[in-house]
């Protein structure tokens, strides 16, 4: 999580310098060797999850968690969501093992406080007050409030699984960074649909399988939509970042300025309200939330949090297999490329698949067919990647329960949602 520290060291940033920096840091190429995962969780009362948890009770429990010895980074989101960010691991199984060990440490500590982790993409009951009172979140809330109420809800009530994978080889091919960048965007809608797990908000069905994804679509498109797919990835990301609005201008004291209609490129050119520096560009990048964010590696941000103690392992295993196994990557690329081309023959091709994925999940027949093909390829690849029998069985069980029948986890949730629903 970015800090609120202010650093104005260094010279003012020029436009050419900013473009060069962005091109250099967004895709760090080499053979895909590492994998990571960021798990966000809602935190509910252990016995009565539909009851709001007072902020003071959460804070006391979280203070205790900070004393635990974990391999993952432990942070908290504005509404009291808990996040574990694994260290980069040398293999899928190393990532799964280290993250599972940390969860086995965190869960008992929370149970002692009468709390539990809930794997849902959107809180089905609560709209809590913002717990974190920091300049970053004050500015973010002020910025998003100009657009509508979805920003506050996103900050306080959503949770996701973010899979982090190496950018890939410099050279073209199935594991080249350009192909992996394309694959991430083509596959994204399939991942949204297969793992949609947020059909409720404030005690009501919303009509969406992934309310979380629908909410993201209501935010500022200049910072939440994908960069242009028609440009070389480095050039596309540099242009996207420089032309995105500035969310806030940090200050050493007092509230941060929330400019209106100021892109980072405009800020460089005008030098107002003060000239931006490298630290400002680095901070600006943390306020951009596209579905795939290049941070040297690729951060896939479109998957809802999953129920069950081990539910998070399935999207991590499937996504990693489809990207890092060369044969699987090539096969699935052809599958999702054909899906996107079919969608392109209809109106609004850029967003149609994503809207259908969030609204219908795998009830959409084209997404269903693509997901079935992707899971079949992933299950073939997992043994080659050293996945344990338990992980392979978890993926196969998800495939049997959801993918093959054209369902997603959201279809299991009923009104009213019970504590049992959160754990299954």
Image (cartoon, helix red, strand yellow):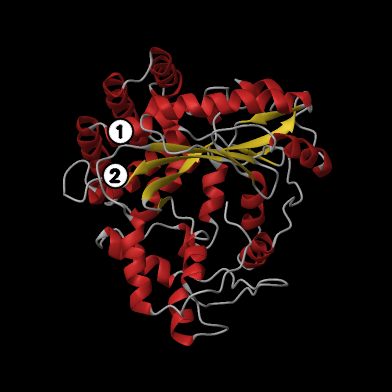
Which residue is drawn at the image coordinates 47% and 68% (left, top)?
A: 281
Q: Is residue 122 left or right of residue 89?
A: right
Q: Residue 386: x percent and y percent?
A: 32, 20
Q: Residue at x 60, y 23 (%)?
A: 104
- Please report the residue visible at 29 percent of the width from the left and 65 percent of the height from the top: 235
Whether residue 158 is visible to the viewer of this picture, yes or no, is: yes
Q: Please tell me which residue lies in front, 58 or 322.
A: 58
Residue at the outermost left position: 172
Secondary element at image label 1: helix
Q: Quadrant of residue 383?
A: top left
The residue that mark 2 highlights is 183
Residue 295 placement, left or right of 122: left
Residue under pointer 1: 322
Q: Secondary structure at mark 2?
A: helix
Residue 2: x and y in percent read 57, 56
In the image, 7 versus 260, the foreground residue is 7
Mark toward the start of the polypeptide (1 vs 2) = 2
Tell me if 340 is positioned left or right of 150 in this view.
Answer: left
Picture disc at residue 187: none
For the residues labelled 1 and 2, say whether their Cβ atoms are less than 8 Å apart: yes
Q: What separation in Å lies between label 1 and label 2 (alpha carbons)? A: 9 Å
295 lies above or below 117:
below
What's the residue at 52%, 46% (across, down)?
A: 213
In terms of depth relative to the viewer, which is nearer, 29 or 403?
29
User: With respect to residue 340, does 361 lie above or below?
Assistant: above
- Locate residue 111, reporting x and y percent: 74, 24
Q: Is residue 161 above or below residue 149?
A: above
- Residue 407 can be seen, yes or no: no
Are there few (<14), some (14-19), or many (20+) residues within 10 Å of tag 1? Answer: many
Q: Where residue 399 sits: x, y (%)?
A: 40, 21
Q: Which part of the image, by quadrant, shows the C terminus?
A: top right
């Amino acid at each position: 999580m970015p800090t609120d520290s202010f650093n104005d060291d260094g010279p003012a940033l020029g436009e050419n310098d900013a473009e060069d920096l962005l091109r250099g840091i967004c895709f760090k190429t080499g053979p895909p060797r590492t994998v990571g995962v960021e798990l966000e969780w809602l935190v509910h009362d252990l016995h009565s999850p539909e009851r709001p948890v007072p902020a003071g009770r959460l804070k006391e429990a979280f203070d205790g968690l900070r004393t635990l010895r974990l391999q993952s980074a432990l942070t908290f989101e504005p509404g009291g969501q808990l996040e574990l960010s694994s260290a980069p691991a040398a293999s899928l199984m190393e990532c799964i093992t280290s993250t599972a060990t940390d969860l086995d440490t965190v869960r008992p500590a929370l149970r002692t406080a009468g709390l539990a982790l809930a794997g849902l993409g959107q809180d089905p009951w609560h709209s809590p007050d913002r717990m974190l009172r920091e300049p970053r979140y004050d500015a973010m809330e002020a910025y998003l409030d100009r657009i509508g109420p979805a920003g506050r809800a996103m900050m306080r009530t959503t949770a996701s699984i973010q899979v982090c994978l190496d950018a890939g080889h410099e050279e073209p091919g199935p594991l080249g960074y350009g192909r992996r960048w394309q694959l991430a965007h083509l596959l994204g809608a399939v991942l949204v649909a297969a793992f949609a797990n947020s059909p409720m908000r404030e005690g009501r069905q919303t009509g969406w399988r992934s309310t979380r994804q629908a909410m993201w679509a209501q935010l500022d498109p200049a910072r939440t939509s994908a960069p242009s797919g028609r440009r070389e990835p480095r050039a596309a990301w540099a242009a996207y970042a420089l032309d995105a609005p500035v969310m806030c201008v940090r200050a050493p004291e007092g509230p941060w300025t929330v400019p209106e209609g100021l892109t980072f490129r405009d800020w460089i050119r005008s030098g107002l309200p003060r000239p931006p520096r490298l630290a400002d560009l680095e901070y600006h990048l943390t306020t951009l939330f596209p579905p795939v964010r290049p941070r040297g590696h690729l951060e896939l941000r479109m998957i809802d949090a999953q129920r069950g103690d081990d539910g998070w392992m399935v999207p991590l295993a499937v996504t990693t297999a489809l990207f890092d196994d060369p044969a699987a990557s090539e096969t699935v690329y052809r599958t999702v490329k054909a899906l996107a081309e079919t969608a392109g023959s209809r109106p609004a091709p850029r967003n149609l698949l994503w809207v259908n994925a969030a609204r219908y999940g795998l009830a959409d027949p084209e997404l269903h067919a693509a997901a079935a093909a992707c899971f079949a390829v992933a299950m073939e690849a997992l043994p080659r990647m050293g996945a344990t029998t338990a992980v392979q069985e978890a993926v196969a069980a998800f495939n049997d329960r959801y993918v093959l029948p054209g369902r997603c986890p959201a279809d299991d949730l009923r009104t009213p949602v019970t504590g049992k629903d959160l754990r299954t």
